[in-house]
Image (cartoon, rainbow, N blue to C red):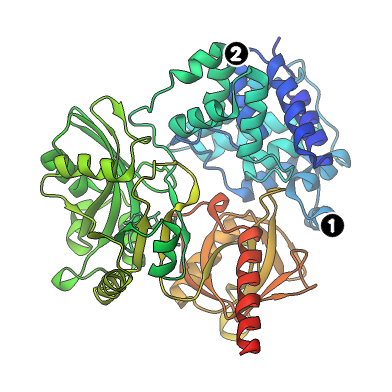
Amino acid sequence: MGTPFKELAELCEKLEKTTKRTTMANLISSFLKKLKPDEIGPAVRLIIGRIFPAWSQETLEISWRTVIKIIKDLTGASNKDISEAFSKTGDPGDMAKILMEKRKRAKQTTLLQSPLIILDVHKYFLSIASAKGPGSKKKKESLLYGLLSRATPLETKYIVKDILGEMRHGVSEGLMEEAIAKASGASLEQTKRAHMLLGDLGDVAYIALTKGVQGLKEVKMRLFHPIKPMLAQPAENVKEALKEHGGKTAFEYKLDGARVQIHLKNGKVAIFSRRLTDVTQSLPDVVKLVLEEIKADEAVLEGEVIAIGEENKPLPFQHLMRRFHRVKDIEKMIKEIPVQLYLFDVLYLNGKTLIDEPYIKRWEYLEKIHGNIQLTPRIITSDPEEAQSFFEKAKSEGHEGLVAKRLDSNYTPGIRGKKWLKIKGILDTLDLVIVAADWGYGRRHEWLSDYYLAARDEKTGEFLVIGKTFKGLTDEEFKEITKRLLELKITEVGGTVYVKPEIVVEVAFDEIQRSPKYKSGFALRFARITRIREDKSPDEADTIERVREIYEKQFRSKAKINSL
Ligand code: ATP
């Protein structure tokens, strides 16, 4: 008999009730130590709100509408019961628990209804994901029905939270790394490094707890398992970047396209998006180019794919998104929206992991193998004027700005640090998640057109609203988003549709204000949507911490103006 899922749910309850980091890490660590080897990976993922490994291409493909329908079927709850339960807690998991506790329909007991173990839950999810093709919708539905009909109210709460991917108990990836280190006796550094290379905490925990420190030390990057991309912090201008990087740095064009990670081994190529989704099928032209040009048997490369229009001018990002994820009529799409690949990094080459090599060295490797594929335009300089004119050149050619890269910096997957600084020269924007929407008025009455925009609270994992807007989208986009939001609907309370946090949008604003209106304590002034970030997942949205930083920066510059 395996470990009951109930124990995992109870652990999450305890985690929800404490905010002390060490207590939380200790609780998780003791739990992990009790698990059987094959339970470790699934359990770690379920605790942090993931169902599949971060690098995996599996998805449940079950709409939130279906989840609600099943809960209704199981409990006999009406729409009114649902919105009441939701209003009480504001959390879909708690809502499901309340409905299960008050279920109006008696639970059917059969011999099969033995308590769920962790591996049962894991297997149900695997079966739901693998139901594909005709009839799969029904099959998925009956599998989820089977799973939830065996779950207690508390277990339902966490199954629902896992499906939603929002746990709200405050276990970040960093905290899970601490717990794994503690449980296995490895150092935090060893654990972090393995995480960077494997890209999934379930895999890291499995190795740490079954093979120990030695196992972690032997971890290597795996071809065709994408790793999280290294990210950049914003800098105001080239001067600030030069100062931060010790007086001399590399400035590369910041191309306004989509990040790609390309894995190549002996004639096989896979291309992954920034969300680690396999987009190989949508980009056969890029695959061909890589196969023809890259002078290596094995490599992991990084770069940006941009859409190009007349005279090879970059087209806005929206055009490119039409190419990504597209698997039908590819030949037609290649003609309609030609793309260009620019490379800027190499992370693995012919059996050797390069992430610990300095930037300058990795670029040298890239120069040796790129063939006729373009490298991202760059200069290395210590001269602010030269840097400024390079910035202006990038902008005048239709690019976003520059990325400054510290010459001696290693590659840190998944980290947004100061080793890379992005310079865009425009006001800040925020990437926020739509968590609810109001029905529009007048011409817009058939659309969900006023969106509640939320930033992520890194401490709790909760999405906190900081503003509302109906500005910035075209009619077509309103229609499309309305359709998607209705698929993600959790419940409707007084004209407001609450949704699963899934859609990320880039938002421009005039100012961030302190405001008691929202729980976050912040409110955006004149927010407007500038693009839909198909390439970002909700856990990559901006955080409340970043909102606070911008607020404080704004505050400081206002104080400066006032003191002049
Ligand atoms: P933004 O919203 O400003 O595009 P982001 O939040 O998507 O930024 P950042 O880490 O802030 O991500 O900026 C890095 C992104 O910029 C990368 O993910 C990549 O898609 C893009 N990019 C364009 N040119 C470069 C470059 N030369 N080096 C690294 N990243 C680049």
Where is residue 333 shown, x and y percent of the image? 23, 58
Q: Give the amino acid at mark 2.
A: Pro
- Residue 552 position within the rendered picture, expressed as x and y whole percent measured from the top left: 65, 70
- Locate the C terminus and report the quarter of the image it occupies: bottom right
- Relative placement, left or right, of 76 versus 541 is right
Which residue is pictured at 54% across the width and 16% down the height? 213
State left or right for residue 337 relative to residue 71: left
- Residue at image x 69%, y 36%? 159
Question: How many labels were placed on the picture?
Answer: 2
In-front residue for pair 134/251: 251
Of residues 360 and 337, the one nearer the viewer is 360
The residue under label 2 is 37
- Quick check: can you spot residue 6? yes
**Ligand 1 location (quadrant):** bottom left
Which quadrant of the figure contains the N terminus? top right
Give residue 446's quadrant in the image: bottom right
Q: Secondary structure at mark 1?
A: helix
Disc 2 + disc 1, Cβ < 8 Å: no
In the displayed structure, would residue 254 be above or below residue 564? above
- Could you tell me which residue is drawn at 66 percent across and 60 percent down? 544
Dot 2 crowding, Cα within 10 Å, few <14, some 14–19, many 20+: some
Q: Quadrant of residue 378?
A: bottom left
Q: Is 210 on the left-hand or right-hand side of 222?
A: right
Circle 1: is it few (<14), some (14-19), or many (20+) Cα within 10 Å? some
Mark with earlier residue (2, 1):
2
Can residue 49 be seen here? The reply is no
How far is mark 2 from mark 1, CA to CA? 42 Å
Say left or right for 2 vs 241. right
Judging by the rendered image, the residue that carries numbered circle 1 is 84
Q: Where is residue 430 drawn, in percent x and y?
A: 54, 66
